[in-house]
Amino acid sequence: MRRLAGKTALVVGIANEHSIAYGIAKALKEDGAELVLTYLNAKARPYVEPLADALGAKLFMPLDVTNLDQQNALFAAISDTVGGVDILVHSIAFCPAEDLHGRVTDCSREGFLQAMDVSVHSFLRLIKAAEPLMPDGGTCMTVSYYGAEKVVDHYNIMGPVKSALESVTRYTAAELGPKGIRVHALSPGPLATRAASGIDHFDQLLNDAADRAPTHHLATIEDVGACAAFLASEGAKNMTGGVHMIDGGYSILS
């Protein structure tokens, strides 16, 4: 039985077939959801469009989350074409390289504001836009990382940014719970995605995580997708506001 049959999912953040967002979109589709997918810009489109086609996306539209006109056009098209949205997946983050690779102490005001806007406030904007299209409730999800909770070498300013994202998850879950809208943060261990490749010494981080995790296995995008599909299902209807670790137990160790 496909748990998400009859539901529509908007997934934001697919860059290629290695993206966490792609793993989530694939799992949601396999569980019966119809998909609305986005791509960042013309440069990204050739990498994302074949994936959207393979997944049979109902809508495939551009979305730079800093562009309010594109966001408005996307949600108008969702309303006109499929009538509403049941699942929102936000899997995007950005920080200028010079700020990402430097000390938190040295982060520029401009870099900090840009990282918070793209990585955190965009989740709020998308939730707010999706809320009227979820009259019967729904599920909103974002993607965090253990560096939000503990200091992780070379994760730098993205640690405080992800901390803010997790706090946003809790507060929106409390506010939207009476409407039947659940909000979650998925927190996988390190994954070899394009976004993660910008972090210094990331290969070492991957190796250390695999060595230390009780399972000795890194998470995969399929693992994250399976968790997301469950959280979007009726089986998780009384779960909200959580940060869900998908890391082979790495985060339980001192």
Image (cartoon, helix red, strand yellow):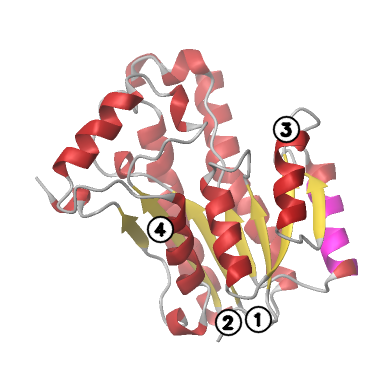
Q: Do the residues bearing badges 3 and 2 touch, measured as CB atoms within 8 Å?
A: no
Question: The residue under label 1 is which amino acid type?
Answer: Ala
Indicate whether 72 appears above or below 115. below
Q: Do the residues bearing badges 1 and 3 touch, measured as CB atoms within 8 Å?
A: no
Which residues are drawn in magenta? 71-80
Q: Which residue is mark 2?
A: 2
Q: Do the residues bearing badges 4 and 2 touch, measured as CB atoms within 8 Å?
A: no
SS for callout 2:
loop
Indicate whether 72 appears above or below 179. above
Question: The residue under label 4 is which amino acid type?
Answer: Asp
Of all residues, the one furthest to the left in this rendering is 254
Residue 50 in picture, x, y percent from top left: 75, 45
Q: Do the residues bearing badges 2 and 1 touch, measured as CB atoms within 8 Å?
A: yes
Residue at left offset 20%, top offset 48%: 250
Label 3 crowd bin: few (<14), some (14–19), many (20+), radius 10 Å: some
Q: Earlier in the sequence, mark 4 or mark 3?
A: 3
Residue at left offset 44%, top offset 83%: 235
Q: Which residue is mark 4?
A: 223
Q: Which residue is mark 1?
A: 5
Q: Looking at the rendering, which quadrant does residue 87 occupy?
A: bottom right
How many angstroms separate mark 4 from mark 2 (CA)?
18 Å
Q: Earlier in the sequence, mark 4 or mark 2?
A: 2
Indicate whether 72 appears above or below 244. above
Question: The residue under label 3 is which amino acid type?
Answer: Ala
Q: Earlier in the sequence, mark 4 or mark 1?
A: 1
Viewport quadrant of the C terminus: top left
Q: Which residue is mark 3?
A: 44
Label 2 crowd bin: few (<14), some (14–19), many (20+), radius 10 Å: few
Viewport quadrant of the N terminus: bottom right
Q: Do the residues bearing badges 4 and 1 touch, measured as CB atoms within 8 Å?
A: no
